């Protein structure tokens, strides 16, 4: 598939797919055209059996994404927003991806950029990363889940601080708050992200998808319902060939061979 505003790559040997947001001169601002391409790429990779993990990053190193495209948004009206269900359609496609996703954040992840990163399953960051929800400076508010995901991920006080003052978190702060899982020197970021993706893609695809679903359920339900969901998933994983293979391979002291087709 060919795209204008993103670059994609698939390593069929490792099962790692990557998507690079490619508007560096506009700090990878997330125009609707870019988001349409991104959602199409996610759809495409999700449907390919060979893909085990998807990495999303931003071209140029200065920004993962500077947010929704403000210049494009400036002309929108309430009626258009309502009729188009503005922001929901293409954006939520990333959060709904059933395969594991990693956001590799170098530079700014602001507004919709921060929200896009939070729709991924794991965020890893270069030391130069900055996370923020500065919509308040435009008299806007986050519109792609920022007020909700940020609050669940880092707590009310810091989320309020970021959304009300517009202040950015450094990579180190984001790490200490649990927003990101790892921070590395910026020039090592893509190696780290691709390596993590390779590790994830080397696991049983089906079980990895079940793990993702189970962890995400923690954000959607009560603890008792979440634990019940996990128990049911745990019971059902025994019906898969991969779980049998994993336990058999362990007892036979050999590497497992997953049914990753
Ligand atoms: C449109 C953007 C943009 C954006 C940067 N640019 N961010 N264009 N939408 N979100 C453009 C600039 O206009 C400029 O274009 C070029 O990219 C380079 O930007 P600079 O400001 O010169 O770069 P730099 O000094 O490196 O600063 C980078 C930056 C800053 C910190 C990211 O550009 C910035 O503050 N951008 C806006 C951040 C923001 O408010 N994000 C929230 C958007 S609202 P020209 O043509 O002049 O060279 C949002 C709502 C989400 O995301 C709602 C749901 C999705």
Image (cartoon, rainbow, N blue to C red):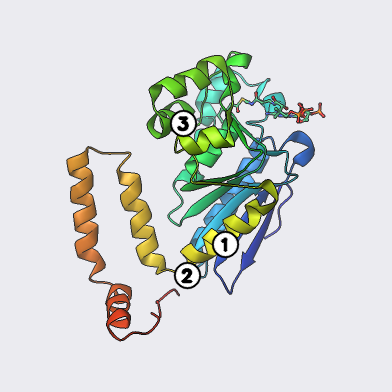
Q: Residue at x 38, y 53 (%)?
A: 212
Q: Position of residue 72 (x, y in %)?
A: 69, 27
**Ligand 1 is within 8 Å of the C-beta of the residue at disc 2:** no
Q: Residues within 10 Å of mark 3 (few under 14, many from 20)?
A: some
Q: Nearer the viewer, residue 128 or 33?
A: 128
Q: Which quadrant does ligand 1 occupy?
A: top right
> Could you tell which of marks 2 and 3 lies nearer the N-terminus?
3
Q: Does dot 3 land on a helix, a strand or a loop?
A: loop
Q: Which residue is mark 2?
A: 202
- Image quarter where the C terminus lies is bottom left
Q: Nearer the viewer, residue 128 or 261?
A: 128
Q: Nearer the viewer, residue 169 or 224?
A: 169
Q: Which residue is mark 1?
A: 195
Q: Position of residue 197 (x, y in %)?
A: 53, 60
Q: On the image, which quarter does residue 169 sit in?
A: top right
Q: Which residue is mark 3?
A: 145
Of the residues tagged 1 and 2, which is closer to the observer? 1
> Could you tell which of marks 1 and 3 lies nearer the N-terminus?
3
Q: Residues within 10 Å of mark 1 (few under 14, many from 20)?
A: some
Q: Residues within 10 Å of mark 2 (few under 14, many from 20)?
A: some
Q: Residue at x 56, y 25 (%)?
A: 133
- Image quarter where the N terminus lies is bottom right
Confirm whether residue 89 shows in the render. no
């Amino acid at each position: 598939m060919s795209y204008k505003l993103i670059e994609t790559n698939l390593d069929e040997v490792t099962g790692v797919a990557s998507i690079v947001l490619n508007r560096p001169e506009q700090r990878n601002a997330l125009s609707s055209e870019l988001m349409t391409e991104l959602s199409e790429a996610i759809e495409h990779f999700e449907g390919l059996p060979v893909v085990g993990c998807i990495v999303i990053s931003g071209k140029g190193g200065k920004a993962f994404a500077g947010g929704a495209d403000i210049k494009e948004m400036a002309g929108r009206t309430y009626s258009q927003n309502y009729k188009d269900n503005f922001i929901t359609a293409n954006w939520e496609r990333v959060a709904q991806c059933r395969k594991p996703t990693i956001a590799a954040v170098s530079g700014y992840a602001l507004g919709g950029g921060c929200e896009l990163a939070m729709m991924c399953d794991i965020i890893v960051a270069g030391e130069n990363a900055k996370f923020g929800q500065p919509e308040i400076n435009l008299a806007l508010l986050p519109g792609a889940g920022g007020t909700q995901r940020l609050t669940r991920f880092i707590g009310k006080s810091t989320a309020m601080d970021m959304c009300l003052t517009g202040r950015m978190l450094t990579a180190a702060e984001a790490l200490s708050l649990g927003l990101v899982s790892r921070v590395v020197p910026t020039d090592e970021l893509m190696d780290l992200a691709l390596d993590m993706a390779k590790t994830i893609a080397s696991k049983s695809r089906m079980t990895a998808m079940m793990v993702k679903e189970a962890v995400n359920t923690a954000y959607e339900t009560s603890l008792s319902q979440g634990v019940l969901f996990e128990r049911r998933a745990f019971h059902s994983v025994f019906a898969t060939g991969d779980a049998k293979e994993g336990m058999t391979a362990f007892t036979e002291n050999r590497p497992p061979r997953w049914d990753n087709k």
